[in-house]
Image: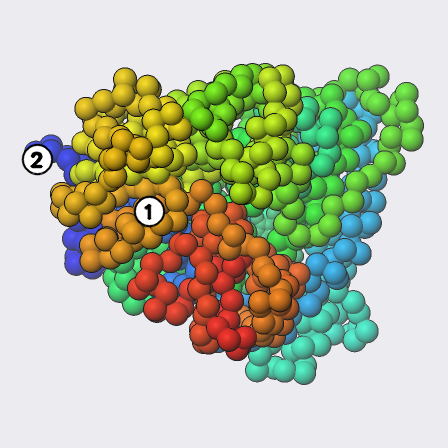
Amino acid sequence: MSQTTQDRAGACPVSHGTGGTCPAHAMADAFDAFEGPYQVDPAEALRWSRDQMPVFFSPKLGYWVVSRYDDIKAVFRDNILYSPRNALEKITPVSQEAMDALASYGYAMNRTMVNEDEPAHMARRRVLMDHFLPENLETKQAMIRRLTREKMDAFIDSGRVDLVEAMLYEVPLTVALNFLGVPEDDIDTLRTFSVAHAVNTWGRPTPEQQVAVAHSVGKFWQYAGDVIERMRAEPEGTGWMHDTIRKNALMPDIVTDSYVHSMMMAIIVAAHETTALASANMFKTLLTHRDAWDDICADPSLIPNAVEECLRYCGSIVAWRREATAPSTLGGIDLPEGAKLLIVMASGNQDERHFEDGDRFDIYRDNAVEHLSFGYGSHQCMGKNIGRMEMRIFLEEMTRRLPHLRLAEQDFTYLPNTSFRGPDHLWVEWDPALNPERTRPAGANAQQHFPVGAPDRKAIARRVVVTAVRREADGVVGLTVADARGRRLPNWSAGAHVELVVDGYDRKYSLCGRPDRDRFDLAILREEQGRGGSRHIHDTVREGMELKLRGPHNLFRLDEAAPHHLLVAGGIGITPILTMADRLKALGKPYAVHYCGRSRAAMAFLDRLEADHGPALTVHAKDEGRRADLAGLVADLPPGGQVYACGPDRMITALEELTSGLPEGTLHFEHFSTSLGSLDPTQETAFDVDLKDSGLTLTVPADTTLLDTLRAAGIDLASDCCEGLCGSCEVRVLDGEIDHRDRVLSKAERADNHRMMACCSRAANGRKLTLA
Ligand code: HEM
Ligand code: FES
C-alpha cells in the first residue's frame, strides 16, 4: 500500500472536534477480520462504520471495508470497475513452505466463474446456465425431500442430535454432488478438503497450519482432476459438471481446460458449504426467536420468506471481495486503482438505510429477499434457487415433524475467516414422546410445495388487530392497529409507510404516530373518486377486526444531516410530514412546516401540530384565502436546505419546477399513489429486450410489464411499490430509447438514458431495448 493511499484513507469523513483522535479512525485501525467482534457478529461489529465511516481502510487486513447496503450493491453492480478477480485469492499470504507443498501436487487453481472478468465470464455463464433454470430445478425437490426424510428418520426418536452432523452438512453435499453429476465419494474426505479450501482462501492459518492446509488443498486439487478424468470416461453422464466437460470439448475457448479443473474444486465448496452453513444459521436463529418458529409451525406458508429473512439476518457468506480497476469514489471516499475491497454483506443486510429496523429478525419483512447474501448483478449466485429449495425443505420437514424442537445449552464455535460463517455444531433437543407422528402417523408424509425461485411478496403479511377507530377530520379516519398475537411491532423511521391488506385491497398509508412497538397509527382519507380501497376501509373497518399488514418500509427517508428542512404537506400528505417534524424537533434541527388544505375542518392533526410544532407551523387553508407561496418558500431556502413534500400531483410538479435550478437532491417527495403500475393494453405496444448478461431476447407484450416479463424468464428482480415510486426495480439500459414513467429518476438521469424502472417504464415507440 503506497503512502498516497494511506493518506487518502486518512481523509476522515466524520465531523469531529479538533484535537484528540478520531474515534472512527481508531475503530478502523482496530478492525480485525479474523478475531474479536467481527467473528462474533459481523453486522454488529460494523455498526459504527455504517453510521460514521461506511468505507474505511483496514491496515490489519490491507483491504477497504465497505459496510453500507447501497455501496455494496454499487460495487456488485459494476463488475468492470470493481473486478471480481480477487474473490478467491488467498487472503493470508502463503509461506514459501506452503507454496512448495501446493506445487508438489501440481496445484494450479485459476479463474472459475465467480472470479472471472468480462467478457470471458458472461460468455461462460451463458453457456452453462441451463441446469440452473427454475424449470430444470423443479425435479430436484423430490430428491432433496427424500434425503432430508432419511436423515430425520434416523434421529427422530433420539431426542438429541447435532443437526450439523446429522443432516445439515451431508444433505447439501449429496445434493451438490447429484446436481454436479459427481460420484458420491467419501463424504468425510470431501469435508476435510472443503474446510482446508475455506481456510486456505478466507482464513488466517498459522505458518504451521499453512503447510497442513496446503497438503489438504493439494490433495483436493488432485482429487478434482481424478474426478474429471472419471467423468470424461462417461460421455453420456448427467449433471452440471458433465455438461461443463462436454462444453469444454465443444467450445474450449469459452469453457477452458483450466476452468474445468479449477471449477471442479471450487463448485463443490460453493454448492454445499454455503447451504450447510446457511441452514445451520437458520435453525439457530429461528430456535432463538421462538415466536417466529411457532408461527411457522402453525402456518408453513411463511417458510419461503422466513428462509429469505434468515439469509438476510444470518447468511452464510458474510463478506465477498472485489478489486478496483481504476480510481473511483465510493461512499464519499476516493479509492485508488488496485484498491482491494472487502464488501461485508452481513453489514449491508442490516443497514437501517435500506431495511427498516434492520437488526431485528422479522419473518414478516416483505423485502427480506433484497438481501445481498447471494451477491448481486452479473455474478449473482447461480445456485441460489438450489440453496433456497434445500433450506425450505429442511425447515418444512423439521417444523412439521419436530415442532417441539429446542436449542440445547452449548457454546458455539465457528471457523475463523472473513467470509464463510456458520456454527460447527448445532445441538438440538426434544421429547420424542411428543413427536406428532406418534399420534398422527400420516403427518410424517405431509408436504407443501413451494415453486422454485424467490418468494411471492403477496404471500407475506403480518396479522394485526384494530384497537381504535377515530375521526381525524372531515373524510379522514384514524386507525390504531396492534399485532394480533400481542407481539412487539417493528420500529420505523420518519417518513415510513405500511401496506394495509383488507379484503383483497392492498393500500399504502404513511405511519403518523410516534414510533411505538405496541401500535401503528394511520390516517386514511376517503377518496370518493379513487379505486375503492379507502371507501372500503371507511365503510367496513371497525375496532376488534383482524387485518393484514406489510411493512413498514421507508421510501421517503429524511436526510438528517441537512442544515435546514422545509416540510410541505397538501391534505392527507401531512401524515409522513408530521413524523418528519417530530423527528427534526427531537434532533433539535431547524425546520418549517407548511400545511395546505381545503379548510381547517378537513385538515387532520391540526391540534397536534399546533401543540407540538406551533412556532414552525404555517397553515394554508384555502377557504381562509391563504395559499402557500411555494415560489417564495423555495427562494428563501437557506443554502444546503432540503425540501420534503407530500401531496397532490400538481403541488409536487410545481415544486419540481421551482427546485429544478437547485442542486440535485434538494427536493424529496412522495405521491399518495400513482397509476403507473397499471397498464392499459389498448394504449400500449409490445417491445423486445435483449439481455446482454444472460444472452436472452424477450418480448414484453402490450399487457405485461417489463418486470413481469423478466421474472417469468427466471430473472430475480427486486420490486416494492410496482408503481414507479421506489426505485427498487431499476435495470441498466445499454441501448435503446426509454419511455420513462416512474417518479424516481431526476430529469438528468432520464436524459442520460441508462436507467429505467422495470415495473412501469417501457421502450419508446415499441422499439427494442438492450439491458445489461
Ligand atoms: C456465486 C452465495 C449456493 C453456485 C455466489 C456468490 C455468493 C454466493 C455470495 C458470489 C456472488 C457475486 O459475486 O455477486 C451462496 C449462498 C448459497 C449458495 C449463500 C446457499 C445458501 C450455491 C449453490 C450452487 C452455487 C447450491 C451450485 C449448485 C454458485 C456459482 C457462483 C456462485 C456457480 C458463481 C456465479 C458467477 O460468478 O457468475 N454464491 N451460494 N451457489 N454460486 Fe452460490
Ligand atoms: Fe418501485 Fe418499480 S417497484 S419503482
What is the crowding at mark 2: few (fewer than 14 residues within 10 Å), some, or many (at least 20)? Answer: few
Quarter residue 41 falls in: top left
Residue type pointed to by label 1 = Met
**Eye-nearest disc, 2 or 1:** 1
Above-or-below relation of 467 to 448: above
- Residue 762: x and y, percent? 51, 67
- Residue 122: x and y, percent? 53, 72
- Distance of label 2 from label 1 (alpha carbons): 44 Å
The numbered mark at residue 651 is 1
**Helix, strand or loop status at disc 1:** helix
For the point 58% across and 68% down, the residue is: 684
Q: Nearer the viewer, residue 241 or 695?
A: 695
Left or right: 4 as drawn, with respect to 353: left
- Residue 102 appears anywhere in the view: no
**Helix, strand or loop status at disc 2:** loop
The numbered mark at residue 18 is 2
- Residue 216: x and y, percent? 58, 54
Count of marks, rendered view = 2
For the point 24% across and 57% down, the residue is: 660
For the point 38% across and 25% down, the residue is: 601
- Residue 682 appears anywhere in the view: yes
The color scheme shown is rainbow
For the point 62% across and 38% down, the residue is: 505
Q: Residue furthest left?
A: 19
Above-or-below relation of 272 to 131: above
Left or right: 724 as drawn, with respect to 276: left
What is the crowding at mark 1: few (fewer than 14 residues within 10 Å), some, or many (at least 20)? Answer: some
